[in-house]
Amino acid sequence: MSSVELTNENRSAQFRRKLLVVTSYTFLIFISIVSLIPFMWMVLASFKPLEEVQRLNPFPTVWHPDNYISVFKQIPFAQYYFNSVFVAAWVTFLTLLTSSMAAYAFARLQWKYRDHLFRLYLATMMVPGVVTMIPNYALMVKLHMLDSYTGLIVPAAFSAFGTFLLRQFMLGIPPSLDEAAAIDGANHWQIFWDIIMPLSRAGLITLAIFTFMGNYGSFFWPLILIKSESLRTLPIGMLYFDSNYGKQTNLIMAASVMNIIPLVILFVSTQKFLVKGIQLGAVKG
Amino acid sequence: MNKSMKRSDFWSAMGFLLPNLIGFLIFTAGPVLFSLAVSFSNWNLERTVPFAWTGLENFIDLMHSQDFWLYFINTAYLMIGMPLSIFGSLMLAILLNQKLKGIVVFRTLFYLPSFTSGVALMILWKALYNPDFGPINMLINTISHDLGGSIHVAPAWLLSTRNVLGLRVESVGLTIRQWGLGARDALVIMGIWTAIGGNNMLLYLAALTNVPPELTEAAEIDGASKWSLFRNVTWPQLAPTTFFIVVMSFIGGLQGGFDQARVMTDGGPAGTTTTLAYQIYTKAFEQFQVGYASAISWVLFSIILVITLINWGIGSKDLNY
């Protein structure tokens, strides 16, 4: 092989690499635009006067940040915000507590019927939510928990999925750690709290984010449970805002923007954990 | 660990398990059994009819109800975007699996629709699809007008029973094939936009980074083309991920469609966006026929179970799980 041929080959390889980079960026940018356009329309529409929403000009002729204030004047949006965050925070706290304790029992302790019971937990994860929804609703009626924060929080606080996820994390912690602590005279509670919990931090954070998000956006359960306006969460408030004031597209879009902003902030600030958590291969929808 | 420790573990385990187990029994396991029992009754929340055990009556009624089959077809229809969406997720993952500057930014942008999905985005899409004032149709009409065509070519989207498969809606007397773009297609398109850059893409991305580099390097040295590299090396390595995604997508898809129907279409037009999940809701919480609704939910569960088992059967043959 002569040296001339070699440089030619190098050049064509270099050219091909450059072509690949350019094509890749073209696709990356194109897809980003497709995924962003609806959001851009939403944000721009939220700043337009109503009659301009129906026109194709992308930018408002006069910017109307006061649309956002109008939302708060027309509906108790701050109350919806509070309800969603309050309920989601409580459910997240209780889920982390109950799931991590159960996961400890499943992952770190030896007892009879452990694997049978765990299989039962797994099996119920395949049951569609609508199957349990009706009996749970009837139960709420019986317990007088209809139309209450308790009714929104308590049934959501026991997660088979959370138990499963944290169990997977805890199985990865070397057993020698608890054995050493047990020899030093630590009881199970101390081992759980001082050794296992700190080492499961990544799993706990992942579960916390997913539980919080899931309940912040939860729709079906609050829809059937909540009757009074003061207890509506964001999705329910948005639904009625849209069906009662549906013609005010600019205000509806302002409300939608405010609805998703906390999610965007949460995502950008926690993406490292999230991406890892999902990639553990266990997290669904 | 010695024997005495094992024995004492049982009560400790119960202590740790109990808070979760009690909730699990009350809000999950109990309701599953309760729901099964109720599906054999005529239980009505408004007590307009006296309670009675009716055996298989609900299930027989269902099988003979034209509506049920329409809703079953709708549920399946909304899943036709699945292969495209899964394939798209893989393509995006391959695109992101390169050492390029700014790749994390692109990943974030791709993931945004799925992360923010929910009622707010459905309300947004409802506005985008508005046949008269929505930006999609205004754009279509403007382009069509500029090309000298009619300004009435744009689809009515969420208000239309048309569909790309031309399915009829016989239960409301639409016996002519409904060619075109309509509500179901609109939901499919929205679904693809939401899901394509979501969790499936991240799962594929993780799987791609786990493909041993020796494998691809060896194939490259052998002079394999990009396509044959993908077909013979990467794709088989991704099989477990694809399998997991397909199983989860079926489970999710079969019980899906509720939020869209409630927020965007009320299950219409002519019931064409009512899925089984939405039918269960309307039966139970609008018509209070709880027994009947429970029966539908068990039929749905059975379908999910059968399809998951079939998937496992096919998947395990190929994968040696």
Image: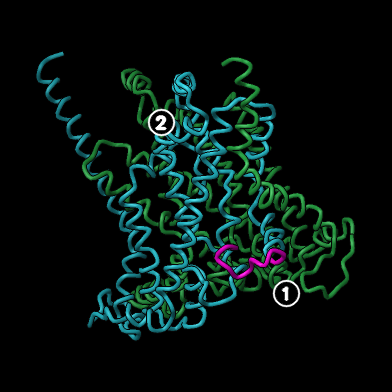
Chain colours: A cyan, B green
The picture quadrant where one finds residue B141 is bottom left
At 70% from the left and 49% from the top, the residue drawn is: B301
Q: Residue at x 46, y 70 (%)?
A: B123
A115 vs A188, nearest the viewer: A188
Mark-to-mark CA distance, 1 and 2: 49 Å
Q: Residue furthest front?
A: A185
User: In this orientation, which residue lies closer to the viewer: B86 or B30?
Assistant: B30
Q: Quadrant of residue A56?
A: bottom left
The residue indicated by pointer 2 is B230
Amino acid at the residue labelled 2: Phe
| Residue A112 vertical placement versus B120 (above, below) | above
Q: Amino acid at mark 1?
A: Gly
* Pointer 2 chain: B
B53 versus B87 height, above or below: below
Location of the C terminus of chain B (image quadrant): top right
Q: Is residue B309 magenta?
A: no
Dot 1 corresponds to which residue?
A: B173
Indicate the secondary structure of the residue bearing disc 1.
Answer: loop
Answer with left or right where residue B273 lies relative to residue B132.
Answer: right
Q: Quadrant of residue B305?
A: top right
**Where does the image place residue B114, in percent across and percent down from the top left?**
43, 54
Name the quarter where the N terminus of chain B is drawn.
top right
Residue density around tag 2, few if under 14, some if 14–19, many if 20 or more, within 10 Å: some
List x then y, in percent, for residue A168.
51, 33
The range drawn in magenta is: A141-151
> In the rendered view, does A53 fall on the left or right side of A171?
left
Residue A157 lies, with reference to residue A222, above or below; the image says above
